[in-house]
Image (cartoon, rainbow, N blue to C red):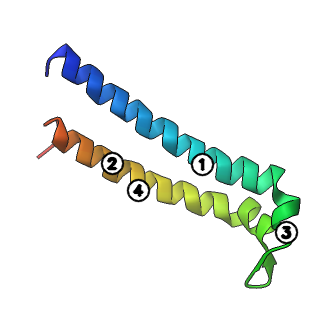
Amino acid sequence: MNDKRLHEYWMKNLTYVGILLAIWFLVSYVAGIFAVNALDNIRIFGFKLGFWFAQQGSIIVFVILIFVYSALMNKLDREYDVHED
């Protein structure tokens, strides 16, 4: 792969990582810590939404983001022909 394609590949990878980390930050810190009082007015299965995000939501979202990153990178690897057979 030439340097230009390698740079494009790396920049797309960094874009994916940045977006996914921003989502994780919003869910775990903003929803789970900073906005917990506002979210506590909403209930899911009898639990306050702020409590749910702080205790379970951020972990579940993190695991989902791992699968999303894996799928995005597999697609990117195939696009730039650096995938494993």
In the image: residue 6, left or right of residue 17: left
Q: Residue furthest bottom?
A: 45
- Disc 2 residue crowd, few under 14, some 14–19, many 20+, Cα 10 Å: some
Q: Position of residue 71 (x, y in %)?
A: 32, 53
Alpha carbon of mark 1 to alpha carbon of mark 2: how far?
Answer: 16 Å
Alpha carbon of mark 4 to alpha carbon of mark 1: how far?
Answer: 13 Å
Q: Residue furthest top?
A: 3
Q: Which amino acid, mark 2?
A: Leu
- Disc 1 residue crowd, few under 14, some 14–19, many 20+, Cα 10 Å: some
N-terminal label among 2 and 3: 3
Q: Which type of secondary structure does the marked residue at label 4 adopt?
A: helix
N-terminal label among 3 and 4: 3
N-terminal label among 4 and 2: 4
Q: Which amino acid, mark 4?
A: Phe
Alpha carbon of mark 4 to alpha carbon of mark 2: how far?
Answer: 9 Å
Q: Which type of secondary structure does the marked residue at label 3 adopt?
A: loop
Alpha carbon of mark 3 to alpha carbon of mark 4: how far?
Answer: 29 Å
Residue 83 can be seen, yes or no: no
In the image: residue 70, left or right of residue 36: left
Question: Residue beneath label 1, please?
Answer: 24
Dividing the picture into quadrants, the one containing residue 67 is bottom left
In the image: residue 19, left or right of residue 78: right
Question: Which label was assigned to residue 40?
Answer: 3
Q: Position of residue 9 (x, y in %)?
A: 27, 29
Alpha carbon of mark 2 to alpha carbon of mark 3: how far?
Answer: 34 Å
Question: Which label was assigned to residue 67?
Answer: 4
Question: Residue beneath label 2, please?
Answer: 72
Q: Are marks 1 and 3 in contact (CB under 8 Å)?
A: no
Position of residue 45 relative to residue 10, above or below, is below
N-terminal label among 1 and 3: 1
